Image: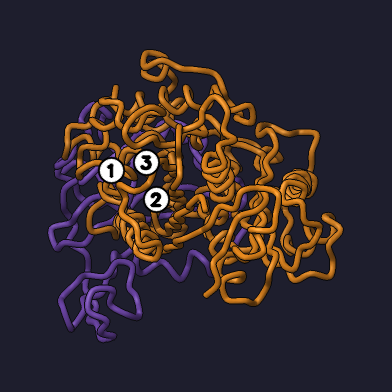
Chain colours: A purple, B orange
Amino acid sequence: MPTPSRYWREIPQRYRLEAEKCKGCGLILFPPRLVCPQCGKREFERTKLAGTGKLLTYTVIRVAPEGFEDQSPYAVGIAELDDGARLTAQVVDCDFSRLKVGLRVKLEFRKIHEDGAAGVIHYGYKFVPE
Amino acid sequence: MRDVAVIGLGMTKWGELWAKPLRSIFVEAALLAIEDAGLDRIDSMVVGCMSSGLFVGQEHLASLLSDYLGRNPIPAARVESACSSGGLALRQGFIEVASGMSDVVLVGGVEKMTDVTGCEATFALGTAADQEYESYHGLTFPGLYAMMAVAHMHRYGTTRDQLSMVAVKNHDNGSKNPLAQFPSKVTVEMVNQSVLVADPLRILDCSPITDGAAAVVLCPLDMAKRMKKPAVRITGSGQATDTISLSSRKDITRLESTHIAAGKALAMAGRKIEDMDLFEVHDCFTIAEIMITEALGLAAPGQGGKAVEDGVTGLRGKHPVNPSGGLKSKGHPVGATGVAQAVEVVKQLRGEAGERQVKGAKRGLTQNMGGTGGSALVHVFEAD
């Protein structure tokens, strides 16, 4: 089981949706990086992700990996947010039959999974229909 | 650079090899390759393996394998690039011989995947995705390829039946391969009705969990000409990377790293894609083969589904893809796959492929990729 530092250092992104905007080309980087993959600049300003966007694609996971067995089946998607950032998360509070490309979603703070009975409880963002 | 030839091929029957440990699986394939080469000399060894650490709890693999092969103290390296670890091993071996650093190099690939439960294997394979921003949310590899399939179907109208036709074709080819894990034939109806893994992908859209190894022996072309087997040259090697996170990709319906690696390999060989007589490609899922045929230029963007439907990629089609049965039927011991693709292409170019022989094949191409295309390796082979 990993030490808590592994999860603690991701808190700004997972809890507060902190991203960075490249001062060179304006690309939103989530998670933050040290080098902009688009223009190579290394100066950024902190920003917060747009809380809404639309699904680019999705699936329903029926065979789960270790740690998610008790949640399956569950939906996962990639959304493009209104600021252009793209990210992956579960799609919840949404009947599977409603899933479609272009579905409007918003980000909500939710529990993701836990490291067994005595381990860390992991939180983060999920998509819910707008 | 020196011209490089493949002189020995080794592969054993793949499957759930419960009675055999990783080291024996590897050594059996390596011994076959050395015997096939007819040359009892190995100067150096490169082994592709994705995750012996997670699958069997063993690292420091290269030295262990050279020991069990009885070849200590030769230099040995283990390389990793997820499911393209085998292709990467081939490229490293090629570079080593071409550069003049070594003359006879054994290139192997191995994975032992059935010592863990299905959930643990799914987790181990998932480490080829972004652990913090994809796997963290419960994504699996079938899930990632399912999302590529949904996007491809939405954008281009690729159909459920077209996905199934990839499985039908590859199991048909695999039924002619005595080493395949699942040589059984399937029908479109069977694939369409098999259990869902990650919508829309069903179990028969997915390559299996496999134990297996493959090996080839490489040497300079002038040395190969003195050997008993017909020399097959590696005339092109290309490699490219892309984001491992699917959400960071500009276009999730396109495998850009494969497109770039193929361009580089073909340019090195001085050939065009139409010059190739057969293709062994990374059909880890049915949608993957459709997208690969597009990335290689065998079909226009969005037309990969139609290509399989029209029989273009069939064994007797214009561009035979995966005559071996591919990952789908032959099996997918992840680190071994890239090397096994080379074994099949060289067999075909020697005219030793039996019932699945592509008639008159003189040139072939392998395409091996890691993750959802975060890495890609392409090699071009030509009968001398």
Q: Nearer the viewer, mark 3 or mark 1?
A: 1
- Name the kind of residue labelled 1 in the image: Leu
- Name the kind of residue labelled 2 in the image: Thr
Task: Report which residue position mark 2 lands on.
Answer: B372
Residue B337: x percent and y percent? 56, 46
Q: Is B126 positioned to the left or the right of B286 in the image? A: right
Check disc 1: other Cα within 10 Å, few if <14, some if 14-19, many if 20+: many
Which disc number belongs to residue B288? 3
- Name the kind of residue labelled 3 in the image: Ala
Residue A126: x percent and y percent? 31, 49
Foreground residue among B363 and B261: B363
Labelled pair 3, 1 in contact (Cβ < 8 Å) = no
Secondary structure state at the residue bearing disc 2: loop
Task: Report which residue position mark 1 lands on.
Answer: B298
Which residue is at a point 23% across and 39% down the rendered structure image?
Answer: B152
User: Which badge, 2 or 3, is on the more N-terminal residue?
Assistant: 3
Count every numbered label the image shows and give the total: 3
